[in-house]
């Protein structure tokens, strides 16, 4: 899940107004954006909102320990979430169309790259040789003022591939990845816009598998599963692989009950009309994909999720890198609730989507935040943590998603007893890995409440040669 790049001296005051969230779009995009929701005002006073939410969650959790019916409230909440989870698990997905009726739509493949000399050559060769009518797609690489060999490599590749187009941004360009994508959007002509990260490894048949899903008019975007190319490297990369399996499974099942599908950055496909309707990519968020998810749903578009085929990417290989990455994800995911809370309460998404969003907000954001005061009160009152039923349900849902995800991967393979044992061990170990989210989310919500500066992006360094040797 990519995020915007922010310079280290990017000071942010919650009382400052933003002049614009989009970077130099053409008149067409500006005209479309003017008809959508007013975005700049939504990003003001985030710190106050975060502090208010943190106060409510902490005081509410403490109050549940002090009132006689607190445990009954938690059991009731667990029951409601459990029923919703069962609906998701037992939902039957309608399947995907495999063929296009009529002419294949034009597709523009976009990649924002900065100092990606290790992976850019393989990426371009991969994207320029996809199984899709050659005259119906092009590839745009936005070189975001790279200072390594990336510009030289792209110049050489442009001579080799006629459907490759390169846009070079200058040093003064702003907005990070979102700014790069917004800048190239008026130049490309795709009816469908596909976005990949620079370390992506894209299956040859991805476009012909995904594009037919856009034949349903309400589908504004499609997200394919992200797989970890270096999954076998260590504990952290194996955990990320299992996490992606569970995440995509639940996204797909949520869409089956009319809930929310979410974008995950790398491997996202967006209908151009839908992108214009909500004003392009948001340059005032650190997770452009999560922010775009909410705005698409608020504009009455659906997002489909596809389990197979998958786009491979590099997983971070250390605990520190994982902490930086997930803190960014947590803050970006949390920001969108603070930014669009009024539209959500007005039921702009529709009842099913709003309810589904609310259930997952509790599981993914509220419960991790409440665990800290819950533990403090449990220790002080010499009793078990009150949120144990909800926490146990969350862990069970995570494990169930991993089991189904692995089953889908190995569905055509005969597994030996030893292999089943190893997979069970992997699920248990990955469940331990998933506990990092509790620490990340609880610390992020606290920091956002007191720190006026945006989280600085720590760029992941891609090691393309290691992945090529696998």
Image: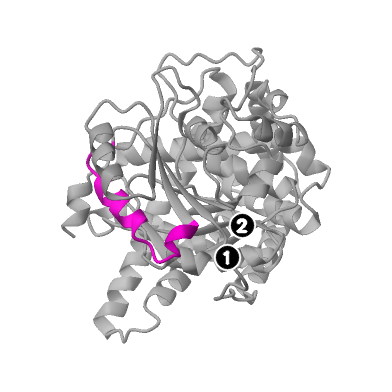
Residue 23 is situated, as x and y percent measured from the top left of the image, at 56, 26
Secondary structure under tag 2 reads loop
Badge 2 crowding class, 10 Å Cα cut-off, few under 14, some 14 to 19, many 20 or more, is many
> Quick one: label 2 or label 1, which is nearer the N terminus?
1
Q: How was the colour assigned to the protein in this rendering?
A: one colour
Q: Residue at image x 63%, y 16%? A: 14
Region in magenta: 116-136
**What element does badge 1 sit on?**
helix
Q: Quadrant of the N terminus?
A: top left
Q: CA distance from mark 2 to mark 1?
A: 7 Å
Left or right: residue 134 versus residue 421 is right
What crowding class fits label 1: few (fewer than 14 Cα within 10 Å), some (14-19), or many (20 or more)? many
Indicate whether 289 appears above or below 324: below
- The residue positioned 27% from the left and 85% from the top of the image is 416
As drawn, the label of residue 261 is: 2
**Residue appearing at x 28%, y 39% in the figure:** 154
Is residue 378 in sight in this rendering? no
Give yes or no for residue 393 being in the magenta stretch: no
Task: Find disc 1 in the rendering and name its residue.
Answer: 252
Depth check: give the residue in front, 66 or 265.
265
């Amino acid at each position: 899940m990519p995020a915007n790049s922010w310079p280290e001296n990017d000071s942010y005051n919650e009382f400052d107004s933003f002049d614009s969230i989009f970077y130099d779009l053409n008149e067409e995009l500006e005209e479309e954006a003017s008809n959508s929701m007013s975005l700049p005002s939504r990003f003001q006073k985030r710190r106050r909102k975060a502090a208010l939410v943190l106060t409510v969650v902490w005081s509410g959790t403490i109050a549940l320990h002090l009132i006689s019916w607190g445990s009954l409230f938690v059991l009731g909440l667990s029951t409601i979430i459990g029923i919703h989870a069962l609906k998701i698990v037992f939902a039957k997905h309608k399947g995907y169309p495999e063929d296009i009726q009529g002419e294949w739509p034009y597709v523009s493949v976009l990649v924002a790259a900065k100092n990606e000399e290790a992976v850019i050559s393989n990426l371009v060769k991969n994207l320029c040789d996809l199984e899709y009518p050659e005259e119906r797609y092009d590839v745009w690489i936005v070189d975001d003022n790279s200072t390594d060999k990336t510009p030289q490599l792209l110049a050489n590749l442009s001579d080799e591939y006629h459907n490759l187009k390169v846009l070079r941004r200058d040093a003064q360009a702003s907005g990070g990845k979102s700014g790069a994508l917004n800048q190239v959007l008026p130049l490309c002509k795709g009816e469908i816009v596909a976005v990949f990260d620079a370390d992506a490894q894209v299956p040859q048949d991805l476009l012909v598998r995904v594009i037919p899903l856009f034949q349903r008019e309400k589908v504004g975007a499609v997200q394919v599963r992200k797989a970890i190319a270096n999954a076998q490297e260590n504990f952290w990369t194996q955990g990320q692989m299992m996490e992606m399996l569970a995440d995509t499974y639940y996204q797909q099942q949520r869409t089956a009950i009319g809930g929310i599908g979410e974008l995950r950055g790398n491997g996202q496909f967006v209908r151009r009309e839908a992108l214009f309707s909500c004003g392009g990519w948001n340059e005032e968020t650190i997770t452009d994909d999560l922010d775009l998810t909410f705005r698409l749903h608020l504009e009455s578009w659906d997002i489909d999720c596809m389990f197979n085929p998958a786009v491979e990417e590099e997983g971070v290989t250390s605990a520190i890198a994982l902490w930086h990455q997930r803190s960014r994800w947590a803050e970006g995911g949390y920001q969108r609730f603070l930014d669009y809370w009024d539209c959500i309460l007005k039921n702009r998404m529709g009842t099913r989507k709003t309810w589904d969003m609310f259930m997952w907000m509790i599981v993914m954001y509220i419960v991790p935040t409440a665990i800290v005061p819950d533990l403090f009160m449990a220790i002080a009152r010499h009793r078990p943590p009150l949120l144990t039923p909800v926490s146990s349900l969350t862990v069970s849902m995570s494990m169930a998603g991993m089991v189904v995800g692995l089953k889908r991967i190995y569905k055509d393979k005969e597994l030996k007893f030893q292999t089943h044992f190893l997979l069970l061990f992997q699920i248990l170990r990955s469940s331990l890995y998933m506990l990092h989210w509790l620490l990340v989310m609880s610390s992020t919500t606290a920091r956002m409440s007191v720190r006026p500066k945006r989280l600085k992006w720590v760029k992941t360094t891609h090691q393309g040669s290691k992945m090529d040797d696998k």
